[in-house]
């Protein structure tokens, strides 16, 4: 269960980091291209620390690279939100904001974990995620309260992605186990922060918060949208085609 | 000659940060401890600056090679996450070197997460010392820097942001 829990956190960071790296060289302006890839770098760095720890917890000789590059889709434990396609810049910003608000509150709680390594990763990552949340919040406001076209694109992205937000707070068996053992976080506490933050920012952005309807779940159990397969095909290509290659 | 910890620390002053070569690893405050191991080797304990900092692997390699050049081996470099590095650990000397190099050092009193939306701290232009500056982007050429511009002398500059 500890492995499962660590992988849930790591997979979110890796998959979103990879998704953001798709903007490298394609950002709308240079500063935003650099910002998004900086955030990608932070997330992939966090994933590395967590995979190293997961490999240690498992104790079967697998490495961080094995965990990132040699697992198949159903073995990934990330939430569905982070694997959604980058879409236009607005979609990426909305996806980022919805996740950042969760990520920030999640790490804030994880700092109190009885697991020293997870607490240390959380303390380090929290500082990074603070900058992420600030960045995505500012852009949600700027684009939501921008032109008629940017507003419409943001509202559409928000409506499309909303169904993936419920899963962030739905405890998996691993979440439940971690909470009961003082290792994990209380997702209800995280949810409270998230709801306040999201409603505050959407209001400033003149965007309409979608009603909570059907929520899509399954990522934490390995049931993913078809998008994950394409991500892995690209991300794992090199290790699959040339096993064991190193820099 | 008997090698003491002081020698090792002295040597570490010569190991530069790969991204900002005017700073040594000691100026940055990333070396947490130096230990003599039972089997005659030494262990240098460092802490990463940023999770995704690509310079960390390079720093470990540089520490090893500089010490080995001085005849000190084997050297093991261990990375510890806790306590998390903060820009508060940067030395005064380091802050001065950064400014001379054209990068504004982190504003003291550093990181507080309550500042999610707080107004920007005043960052002084490293060229003309004006405090009339503006942030262009929170994310700059490396994960540790933000991009600023001075409204007085118009020069763009990097700011080493607080962590």
Image (cartoon, rainbow, N blue to C red):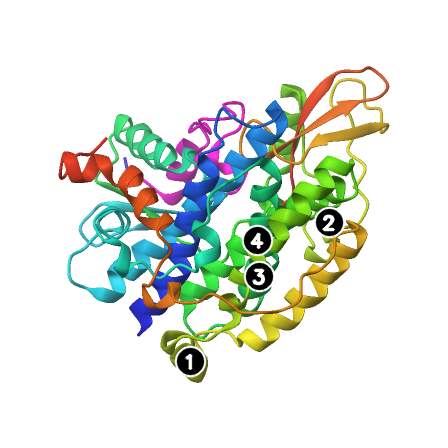
From the top left corner, tell me how far across and down residue A197 is, in percent.
Answer: 70, 61
Callout 1 environment at 10 Å: few (<14), some (14 to 19), or many (20+)?
some
Indicate the secondary structure of the residue bearing disc 1: helix
Give the alpha-carbon distance from disc 1 to disc 2, as whole Å. Answer: 38 Å
How far across and down, in percent of the image, does residue A71 sit? 23, 53
Q: Earlier in the sequence, mark 1 or mark 4?
A: 4
Say few, some or many: other residues with alpha carbon within 10 Å of mark 2 (under 14 / 14 to 19 / 20 or more).
few
Closest to the observer, B147 or B92: B147
Which one is earlier in the sequence, the residue at label 3 or at label 1? Answer: 3
In the image, which disc is placed on residue A102? 3
Which chain does the numbered disc 2 sit on? B
Task: Identify the residue shown where x is 43% and y is 60%.
Answer: A79
Stretch in magenta: B3-29
Which residue does the numbered mark 2 point to in the structure image?
B109
In this figure, which residue is indicated by the disc labeled 4? A160
Q: Secondary structure at mark 4?
A: helix
- The answer for how far apart the CA atoms under marks 4 and 3 are is 18 Å
- Image coordinates of residue A14 in percent, x first then y, are 39, 49
Q: Chain of mark 4?
A: A
Q: Are marks 3 and 1 on the same chain?
A: yes
Q: Quadrant location of residue A208?
A: bottom right
């Amino acid at each position: 269960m500890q492995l499962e829990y660590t992988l849930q956190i790591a997979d979110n960071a890796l998959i979103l980091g990879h998704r953001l790296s798709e903007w490298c060289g394609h950002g709308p302006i240079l500063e935003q291209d650099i910002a998004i890839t900086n955030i990608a770098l932070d997330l992939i760095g966090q994933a590395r620390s967590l995979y190293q720890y997961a490999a240690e917890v498992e104790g079967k000789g697998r490495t961080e690279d094995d965990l990132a590059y040699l697992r198949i889709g159903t073995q990934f434990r990330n939430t569905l939100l982070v694997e959604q396609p980058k879409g236009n810049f607005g979609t990426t910003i909305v996806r980022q904001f919805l996740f950042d608000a969760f990520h920030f509150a999640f790490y804030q709680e994880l700092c109190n974990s009885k697991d020293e390594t997870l607490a240390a990763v959380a303390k380090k990552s929290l500082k990074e995620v603070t900058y992420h949340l600030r960045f995505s919040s500012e852009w949600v406001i700027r684009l939501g309260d921008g032109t008629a076209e940017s507003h419409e694109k943001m509202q559409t992205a928000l409506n499309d992605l909303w169904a993936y937000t419920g899963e962030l707070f739905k405890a998996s068996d691993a979440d439940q186990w971690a909470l009961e053992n003082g290792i994990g976080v209380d997702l209800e506490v995280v949810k409270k922060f998230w709801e306040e933050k999201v409603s505050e920012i959407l209001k400033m952005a003149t965007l309409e918060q979608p009603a909570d309807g059907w929520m899509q779940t399954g990522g934490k159990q390995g049931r993913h949208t078809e998008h994950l397969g394409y991500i892995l095909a690209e991300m794992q290509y090199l290790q699959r085609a040339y096993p064991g290659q190193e820099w | 000659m008997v090698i003491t910890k002081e020698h090792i620390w002295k040597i570490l002053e010569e190991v530069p940060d790969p991204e900002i070569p005017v700073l040594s690893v000691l100026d940055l405050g990333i070396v947490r401890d130096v230990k003599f191991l039972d089997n005659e080797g030494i262990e240098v304990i460092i802490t990463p600056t940023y999770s995704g900092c690509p310079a960390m692997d390079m720093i470990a390699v540089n520490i090893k090679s500089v010490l080995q050049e001085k005849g000190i081996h084997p050297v093991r470099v261990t990375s510890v996450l806790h306590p998390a590095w903060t820009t508060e650990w940067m030395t005064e000397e380091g802050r001065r070197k950064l400014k001379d190099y054209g990068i504004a050092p982190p504003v003291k009193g550093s990181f507080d997460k309550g500042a999610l939306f707080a107004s920007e701290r005043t960052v002084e232009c490293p060229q003309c010392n004006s405090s009339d500056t503006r942030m262009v982007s929170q994310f700059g050429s490396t994960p540790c820097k933000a991009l600023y511009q001075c409204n007085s002398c118009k020069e763009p500059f990097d700011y080493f942001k607080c962590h």
